């Protein structure tokens, strides 16, 4: 089994296919063997990636069913069309004044920051258990024979109904919280996006983030890191976006790290 399953750490910016090509380059014995990955990771995500070799590829469905564990940094104040920093910003606030928070906490920004985490903690149970999750507009899920991301790029999402699917989330826990300055945020976004190859609107997205953040370099933005244990098919960037919707504050996945798949871990 060991020679048929290889566990690699996919880096931020890599695609799973690039990981496979890298393995083949470093091991000539694998050049003419079929290789596939079990469990996709977005280009900006990192972490555990299962590579199947030879006839083990025929058992891919078994590996896809394994539970997964993620550490997800959620950035509050911004929402994008991809639900991570790889997209266009469609909603922004530098004051945590969602309707629920305004009602509960008043308008004191310092108090809002201090009491923000308990509000998120109270919201998390809504995302645990069997939940119905919409596919993200920028994903490879096919509708009418065309991937959703193509519908999105063509500006035709209003012509279709984005499908949903039932998924299972075993647990979500807050493991840490901190802030990031606007200057450091932009530097991270530029660095991460620049590592991604292929056509993902990179320069357009970097320019948009630059225009948005250039006069906000000294502002601080809240980050809450979650540990999510879930079944197959869960999009954790959708969870990030939906948490923002629940609390009335734009949110996105700043960093996604898959720490475990089944028995395989970092």
Image: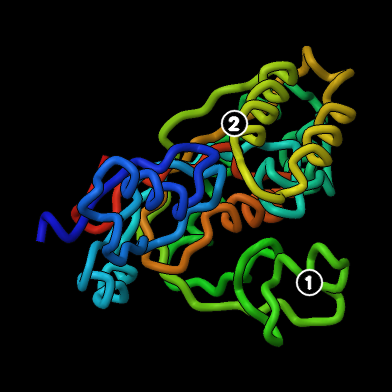
> In the rendered image, which quarter contains the C terminus?
top left
Q: Which mark is residue 151?
A: 1
Question: Gap in Å between the C-alphas at discs 1 and 2?
Answer: 31 Å
Which residue is pictured at 55% across the width and 74% down the height? 132
- Residue 176 x/y as whole percent: 45, 29
Q: Which mark is residue 47?
A: none
Q: Which of the two residues, 158 or 28, is positioned nearer the viewer here?
A: 28
Crowding around mark 1 (Cα neighbors within 10 Å: few <14, some 14 to 19, many 20+) is some
Q: In the displayed structure, would residue 15 be above or below residue 62? A: above
- Residue 44 x/y as whole percent: 56, 42
Q: Which residue is tagged 2?
A: 223
Q: Say whether residue 67 is left or right of residue 254.
A: left
Q: Say whether residue 154 is left or right of residue 149.
A: right
Q: What residue occupies the far left of the structure in this picture?
A: 1
Hey, which quadrant is residue 174 in on the image? Answer: top left
Question: Which numbered disc flags the more N-terminal residue, 1 or 2?
Answer: 1
Which residue is pictured at 34% across the width and 41% down the height? 9
Q: Which of the two residues, 72 or 54, is positioned nearer the viewer here?
A: 54
- Element on which disc 1 rests: helix
- Element on which disc 2 rests: strand
Hey, which quadrant is residue 94 in on the image? Answer: top right
- Residue 150 x/y as whole percent: 75, 68
Crowding around mark 2 (Cα neighbors within 10 Å: few <14, some 14 to 19, many 20+) is many
Q: Say whether residue 118 is left or right of residue 168.
A: right
Q: In the displayed structure, would residue 19 be above or below residue 114? A: below
């Amino acid at each position: 089994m060991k020679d048929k399953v290889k566990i690699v750490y996919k880096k931020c910016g890599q695609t799973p296919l690039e990981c496979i090509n890298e393995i083949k380059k470093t091991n000539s014995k694998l050049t003419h063997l079929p290789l596939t990955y079990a469990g996709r990771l977005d280009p900006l995500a990192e972490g555990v990636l299962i590579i199947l070799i030879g006839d083990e590829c025929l058992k891919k469905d078994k590996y896809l069913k394994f539970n997964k564990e993620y550490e997800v940094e959620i950035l509050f104040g911004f929402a994008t069309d991809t639900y991570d920093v790889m997209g266009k910003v469609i909603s922004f606030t530098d004051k945590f004044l969602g309707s629920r928070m305004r009602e509960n906490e008043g308008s004191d920004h310092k108090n809002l920051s201090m009491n923000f985490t308990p509000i998120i903690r109270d919201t998390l149970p809504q995302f645990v258990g069997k939940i119905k999750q919409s596919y993200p507009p920028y994903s490879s899920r096919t509708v009418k024979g065309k991937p959703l991301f193509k519908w999105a790029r063509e500006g035709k999402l209003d012509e279709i109904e984005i499908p949903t699917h039932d998924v299972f989330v075993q647990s979500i826990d807050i493991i840490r919280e901190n802030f990031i300055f606007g200057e450091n945020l932009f530097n991270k976004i530029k660095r991460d996006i620049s590592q991604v190859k292929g056509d993902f609107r990179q320069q357009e997205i970097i320019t948009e983030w630059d225009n948005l953040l250039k006069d906000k370099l000294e502002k601080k933005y809240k980050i809450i890191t979650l540990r999510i244990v879930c079944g197959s098919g869960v999009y954790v960037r959708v969870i990030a976006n939906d948490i923002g919707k629940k609390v009335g504050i734009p949110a996105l996945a700043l960093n996604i790290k898959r720490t475990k798949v089944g028995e395989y871990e970092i």
